Image (cartoon, rainbow, N blue to C red):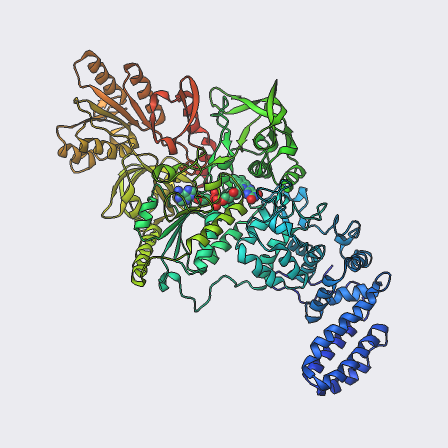
C-alpha cells in the first residue's frame, strides 16, 4: 500500500513501488538521463559517468542498446528523439510480453513505471491498451500473481477477466455505514481512504477500462435494437454520451479529454454517474453482460479527478463578461432547479444567454437535494453545478413559485424571451386505505424532505422529525424512493421493513440500492400490501398495519405481473409508516395557466419531436413532462430543450438590451432580501412585521398565506397574509409566540432579514356578492383576526354586509380595535356594512365567553326570522374553536368555511403533511390545506381525526423550546 496516500488536492505523482521491485530506480534514472539527450548531446556527455555506473542487467542492457541506436538517429534528427524512444521502449516491453508469463521483476517494474504518471507511464498505458486481449490477460494474471499482496483487489482478478470479473468501486462495509449519512458507494476514489495514492486510483479506473471491447455497434451509447426491429432502442445513454470513445481516451491515459467529451453531452456526470439506473441503460446492454464495465463509476470519477487536480475550475475567469452585461442574447427563465432545469440553465448560460432559475424551495437541486439522501448523493455536488452556472452568469431566485408568485405570462412580460419548465413531479401518491390519516403515517417525500432539505435529524435544526430510534418502521413501495426512505430510517435507528406488493424481481429499484439496503439490515416483505392502519383513538397515532397477502396474476401494462389480494391478511405492529408510492406532477402551474396543455395524469404535454409546450416559447422536460422518471432522462430533456431554445431570435440589438434590462430588474426584485421594515408589538407575544417582498405583495389575494423560513436552520411555517401594499412592495405578517420558531422570529428586529418567504400560497378566498342583505360572519379567535382582516375587507369592498366576531382570551391580548387601527378604520369606512362584536374568555372586554355565543344568537334569530340572514360563516383561529363553530352552524345548514393553517412542510403540496381528512359521499378523502385550501368546507372535515394532527410533534416542539431557553 502506498506510503504517499495524499489528499486528492495534491495527487501523488509518484506511486510507490511494491516491495522487491528491482532496478526501478536505475531504469528511471536511465530514462531521465535519456530524456536529457533530447535537449542536447552535451548533457549525454555529462551524464556518461552516471550511466556507466548503473548495474548491468538485461533491462539496462536493452535500454543501453536502444539508446545507442537512438543516439545515432539523433544526430540526423534531434527532434525525433522522443518519438523514437517511445517506439523503442514499447518494443522492449513487447518482447517481454512474448514470454509465457510476465516475470515478477518485469511486472513490478512495469507497475512502478505506470505509477510515475509521466510520459513514460502514458506510453506504457497506451501500449497495454493497444495489446490484443490475450496479452492483456497475461498482464492481468501478472498483476494478480505479483502485486496482490499490495493490492488485495487484484486477487482472483484474472478468473473470468475481462467479462466476468473486475475491480469493484470501494463500498463502505454495511456495519460502518448503516449508522451515518456519509457516502456509501465511494467509487474508485474511495480507495484513497485505504491509503492508495491518487495515481494508483487512476490505474484502478484504467484497469476497469482495459476490459472494454470497443464494440463497433456501441450498445452502451446507442442501446440495442429491439428484436422486432421497430420502436426505441433498449438501454443506451439517454444523453448520448460517447461512451466507447470516452473509454478509449481513458485507455490511452487521456483522462481530461475523456471528461471534456462527457461534458459535451452531460454537464452533470458527477450526479448522473452515481444515480442513473445504469443496469438498465449503458451497463444493462454491455456485451460484458456478466460484469458490465462500471460506466457510471467511471463517469463520476472523471469530474472528481478534475476537482482534485484543479480545485479552482468553475470559479470563473477574470476576463469573463456576464451575458447580462453583454446583453446580446434575449433572457431565458428556467422554472425549477432539478436536473432538468439545471442542465438547461447550464447549457444556455454557456451559450451566452442571460438565464434566471426560479426555484420554489430555498435550496437548489429538486429531488437531488430534498429526495436523494447524502449517503447516495452529496449535496456539494449540486452546489458545484450551481456554482458553475453562476460562474457562467446564471442567476438564481429562491422561494419563488411560478403559478403563485407570478405567472408564466408575467415572466414573459418581465422580459424573458423563452421559459423552460422543469418543475418535476413532486406530488406524493397515497393509497386512500383506512387509517392513512393517522399520525405516524407520512409520505416518503415528507420524511425525506424533513431530513435532506430541512436537516431535522441534526440537533441545531428546528424542523421536527417523527421518532424513529428503536421504532418499527415500515416503508410501502419498491422503488428508489422507498429504498432512500428505508435506509434513512435505518440510519436514524429504526427497525425497518420494506413492504412491497409484488416480488423482488418486479421492484422498480436500482439493484445496487436494494442490495445495500438489505446489507444494512433492512427487512423486505414481498407480496404484501397495506389494507388498513389502526392506532390510538385519542392520539390518533398508528400502531398496527393490516396487510393483504398478495399473489401475482397476469402481466399489466408495465409488463409486470399484476398483484392481487389472496384474501388472507397479516398484522404487523408499526410506529411509523412511510408511503413511497410514486409522485404525480404538482397542479400549481397547470391551474394557473389555462393555455398549458396537460395529460390526464397531469403531466405537461410537449409537441411531437419537441420539448415545446402548447404555449409558444414555453418548453418543458423531466418529470413535469414524463411523470416520475429518472435524473438522466430529466437531464436529457433539459439538454434537448436548450438546443431548441437557443435558436434564432426575432429581436433587434436594442430590443434585446431592453429585454435584458427588464428581466434583470425583475430577477433582482425576486432576489430582494426579505428585510423587516417595521415591527409592531400588538400585544404580549403578538408581533406584526412589515416585510419587503415586492413580488409577493403584487400577487397576494385575500385568504392566501406565505411559507416562512425564519432563519437558515429554522423550519418552514405557514403564515397567513394579514395585509400587503403593492406600491411599497411590502407584506404584513402577524406572529404569535407559540412554538420555538415563532418565538425566535418574534425576537427579530427591524433591519434583519427573514431567511425566506415564499408565496402567496393556497387558493384565494372565494367571494361573491350577497344580494339579499345576508351577512357574512367571521369568527376570529386571537391571531385568527389578521387572516380574517383582508377577507372581510374584500367582502366589504364588494358591498357585502359583514359581522366580525372577534374573540380574545383577555383584553390585554386585543389589537387593531382602536379607531385609528385596522378594524377601527374599517368601521369608519363602512359604518353601515360592518358590525363588530368582541368577546373575551374572562369577560374583561365585550361579551363574556367564546365567539360561539353571539354566533349562536345570530343563528337563532335568523331561524326565528328576526335577524339578518347569515350568508356564510368563515372561521379562523384555534382548531378547537373552528370545530366548535363548525358543529354549531351545521344543524342550521349555514355554509361554513374554516381556514386551516395546518402543519405544513413545503406548503405547495409536495409533502402531504397538511393532510385534512374530509368525508365526501360517506368516504374519507384526503385534502391538503396547502393545495385545496387553506379554506375548506368545515362541515366535511373529520375534526376528531384532524385535530390530533396539530399535536403530533408536541414533544419535539417542547424540546426545541427548552433548547432555545423558552421554557
Ligand atoms: P425535480 O428534481 O423534481 O425538480 C423540480 C424542481 O422544481 C424542484 O426543485 C421544485 O421545488 C421546483 N418547482 C416545482 N414547482 C415549481 C414552481 N411552480 N415554481 C418554481 N419551482 C418549482 N432517479 C434516478 O435516476 N436515480 C435514482 O436513484 C433516483 N432516486 C430517487 C429517489 C427519490 C427519493 C425520488 C423522489 C426520486 C428519485 N429519482 C431517481 C427520480 C429523479 O430524481 C427525478 O426523475 C428527477 O429529479 C427529475 O428531475 P426534474 O428536474 O424533472 O424535477
266 or 701, nearer to the observer:
266
Residue at horizontal 65 percent and vertical 52 percent from the top: 217
Which sits in the foreground, 908 or 414? 414
Q: Is residue 835 above or below residue 98?
A: above
Residue sitting nearer the eye, 749 or 507: 507
Horizontal placement of 812 versus 43: left or right?
left
Residue 499 can be seen, yes or no: yes
Numbered marks: total:
0
Residue 604: x and y in percent read: 43, 40
947 sits left or right of 502 in the view: left
Vertical relation: 180 (above or below) 18: above
Say whether residue 688 is visible: no
Pick the quarter of the image with the N terminus.
bottom right
Q: State the image coordinates of residue 907 (x, y, percent, origin top left).
A: 40, 37
| Residue 89 found in image quarter | bottom right
Locate residue 419, reporting x and y percent.
Answer: 38, 49
Residue 193: x and y in percent read: 66, 54
* Residue positioned 80% across, 63% down in the render: 107
Amino acid at each position: 500500500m502506498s506510503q504517499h496516500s495524499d489528499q486528492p488536492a495534491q495527487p501523488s505523482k509518484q506511486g510507490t513501488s511494491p516491495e522487491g521491485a528491482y532496478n526501478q530506480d536505475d531504469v528511471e534514472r536511465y530514462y531521465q538521463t535519456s530524456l536529457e539527450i533530447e535537449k542536447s548531446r552535451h548533457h549525454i556527455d555529462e551524464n556518461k559517468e552516471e550511466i556507466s555506473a548503473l548495474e548491468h542487467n538485461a533491462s539496462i542492457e536493452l535500454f543501453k542498446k536502444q539508446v545507442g541506436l537512438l543516439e545515432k538517429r539523433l544526430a540526423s534528427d534531434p527532434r525525433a528523439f522522443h518519438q523514437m524512444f517511445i517506439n523503442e521502449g514499447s518494443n522492449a516491453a513487447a518482447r517481454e510480453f512474448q514470454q509465457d508469463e510476465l516475470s515478477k521483476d518485469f511486472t513490478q517494474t512495469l507497475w512502478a513505471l505506470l505509477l510515475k504518471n509521466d510520459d513514460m507511464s502514458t506510453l506504457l498505458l497506451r501500449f497495454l491498451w493497444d495489446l490484443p486481449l490475450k496479452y492483456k490477460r497475461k498482464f492481468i494474471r501478472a498483476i494478480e500473481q505479483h502485486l496482490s499482496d499490495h493490492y488485495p483487489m487484484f486477487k482472483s482478478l484474472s478468473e473470468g477477466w475481462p467479462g466476468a470479473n473486475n475491480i469493484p468501486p470501494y463500498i463502505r462495509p454495511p456495519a460502518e455505514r448503516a449508522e451515518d449519512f456519509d457516502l456509501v458507494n465511494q467509487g474508485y476514489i474511495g480507495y484513497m481512504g485505504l491509503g492508495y495514492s491518487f495515481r494508483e486510483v487512476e490505474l484502478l479506473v484504467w484497469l476497469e477500462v482495459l476490459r472494454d471491447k470497443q464494440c463497433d455497434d456501441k450498445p452502451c451509447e446507442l442501446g440495442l435494437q429491439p428484436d422486432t426491429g421497430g420502436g426505441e432502442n433498449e438501454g443506451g445513454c439517454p444523453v448520448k454520451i460517447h461512451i466507447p470513445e470516452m473509454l478509449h481516451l481513458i485507455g490511452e491515459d487521456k483522462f481530461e479529454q475523456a471528461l471534456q467529451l462527457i461534458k459535451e453531452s452531460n454537464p452533470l456526470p458527477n450526479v448522473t454517474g452515481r444515480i442513473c439506473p445504469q443496469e438498465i441503460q449503458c451497463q444493462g446492454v454491455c456485451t460484458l453482460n456478466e460484469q458490465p464495465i462500471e460506466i457510471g463509476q467511471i463517469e463520476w470519477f472523471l469530474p472528481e479527478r478534475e476537482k482534485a487536480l484543479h480545485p479552482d475550475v468553475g470559479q470563473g475567469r477574470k476576463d469573463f463578461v456576464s451575458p447580462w452585461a453583454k446583453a446580446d442574447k434575449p433572457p431565458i427563465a428556467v422554472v425549477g432547479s432539478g436536473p432538468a432545469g439545471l442542465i438547461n440553465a447550464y447549457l444556455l448560460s454557456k451559450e451566452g444567454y442571460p438565464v434566471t432559475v426560479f426555484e420554489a424551495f430555498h435550496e437548489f437541486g429538486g429531488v437531488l437535494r430534498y429526495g436523494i439522501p447524502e449517503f447516495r448523493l452529496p449535496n456539494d455536488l449540486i452546489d458545484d453545478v450551481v456554482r458553475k452556472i453562476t460562474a457562467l452568469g446564471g442567476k438564481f431566485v429562491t422561494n419563488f413559485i411560478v403559478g403563485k408568485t407570478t405567472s408564466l405570462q408575467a415572466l414573459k412580460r418581465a422580459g424573458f424571451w423563452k421559459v423552460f419548465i422543469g418543475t418535476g413531479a413532486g406530488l406524493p401518491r397515497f393509497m386512500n386505505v383506512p387509517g392513512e390519516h393517522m399520525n405516524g403515517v407520512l409520505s416518503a417525500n415528507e420524511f425525506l424532505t424533513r431530513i435532506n432539505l430541512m436537516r431535522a435529524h441534526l440537533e441545531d435544526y428546528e424542523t421536527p422529525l417523527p421518532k424513529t430510534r428503536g421504532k418499527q418502521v415500515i416503508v410501502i413501495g419498491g422503488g428508489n424512493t422507498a429504498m432512500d426512505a428505508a435506509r434513512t430510517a435505518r440510519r436514524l435507528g429504526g427497525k425497518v421493513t420494506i413492504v412491497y406488493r409484488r416480488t423482488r424481481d418486479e421492484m422498480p429499484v436500482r439493484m445496487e440500492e436494494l442490495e445495500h439496503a438489505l446489507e444494512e439490515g433492512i427487512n423486505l416483505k414481498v407480496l404484501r400490501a397495506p389494507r388498513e392502519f389502526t392506532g390510538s383513538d385519542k392520539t390518533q397515532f398508528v400502531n398496527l398495519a393490516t396487510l393483504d397477502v398478495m399473489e401475482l396474476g397476469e402481466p399489466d401494462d408495465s409488463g409486470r405481473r399484476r398483484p392481487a389480494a389472496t384474501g388472507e391478511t397479516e398484522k404487523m405492529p408499526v410506529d411509523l409508516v412511510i408511503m413511497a408510492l410514486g409522485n404525480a406532477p404538482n397542479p400549481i402551474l397547470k391551474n394557473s395557466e389555462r393555455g398549458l396543455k396537460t395529460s390526464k395524469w397531469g403531466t405537461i404535454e410537449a409537441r411531437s419531436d419537441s420539448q415545446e409546450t402548447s404555449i409558444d416559447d414555453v418548453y418543458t422536460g423531466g418529470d413535469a413532462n414524463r411523470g416520475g422518471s429518472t435524473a438522466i432522462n430529466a437531464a436529457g430533456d433539459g439538454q434537448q430543450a436548450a438546443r431548441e431554445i437557443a435558436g434564432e431570435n426575432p429581436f433587434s440589438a436594442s430590443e434585446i438590451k431592453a429585454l435584458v434590462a427588464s428581466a434583470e430588474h425583475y430577477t433582482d426584485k425576486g432576489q430582494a432580501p426579505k428585510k423587516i421594515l417595521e415591527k409592531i408589538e400588538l400585544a404580549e407575544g403578538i408581533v406584526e412585521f412589515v416585510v419587503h417582498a415586492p413580488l409577493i405583495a403584487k400577487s397576494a389575494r385575500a385568504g392566501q398565506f406565505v411559507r416562512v423560513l425564519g432563519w437558515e436552520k429554522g423550519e418552514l411555517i405557514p403564515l397567513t397574509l394579514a395585509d400587503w401594499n403593492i406600491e411599497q412592495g411590502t407584506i404584513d405578517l402577524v406572529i404569535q409566540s407559540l412554538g420555538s420558531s415563532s418565538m425566535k422570529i418574534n425576537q427579530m428586529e427591524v433591519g434583519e432579514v427573514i431567511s425566506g418567504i415564499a408565496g402567496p400560497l393556497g387558493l384565494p378566498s372565494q367571494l361573491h356578492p350577497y344580494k339579499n342583505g345576508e351577512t357574512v360572519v367571521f369568527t376570529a379567535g386571537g391571531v385568527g383576526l389578521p387572516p380574517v382582516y383582508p377577507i372581510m375587507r374584500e367582502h366589504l369592498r364588494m358591498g357585502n354586509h359583514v359581522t366580525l366576531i372577534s374573540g380574545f382570551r383577555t383584553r390585554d391580548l386585543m389589537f387593531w380595535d382602536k379607531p385609528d387601527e385596522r378594524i377601527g378604520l374599517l368601521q369608519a369606512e363602512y359604518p353601515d356594512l360592518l358590525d363588530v362584536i368582541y368577546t373575551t374568555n374572562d369577560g374583561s372586554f365585550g361579551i363574556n365567553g367564546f365567539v360561539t355565543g353571539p354566533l349562536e344568537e345570530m343563528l337563532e334569530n335568523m331561524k326565528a326570522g328576526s335577524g339578518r340572514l347569515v350568508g356564510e360563516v368563515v372561521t379562523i383561529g384555534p382548531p378547537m374553536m373552528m370545530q366548535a363553530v363548525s358543529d354549531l352552524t351545521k344543524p342550521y345548514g349555514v355554509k361554513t368555511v374554516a381556514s386551516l393553517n395546518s402543519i405544513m412542510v413545503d406548503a405547495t403540496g409536495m409533502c402531504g403533511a397538511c393532510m385534512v381528512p374530509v368525508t365526501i359521499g360517506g368516504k374519507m378523502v384526503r385534502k391538503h390545506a396547502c393545495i385545496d385550501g387553506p379554506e375548506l368546507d368545515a362541515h366535511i372535515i373529520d375534526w376528531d381525526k384532524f385535530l390530533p394532527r396539530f399535536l403530533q410533534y408536541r414533544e419535539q416542539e417542547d424540546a426545541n423550546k427548552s433548547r432555545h431557553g423558552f421554557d
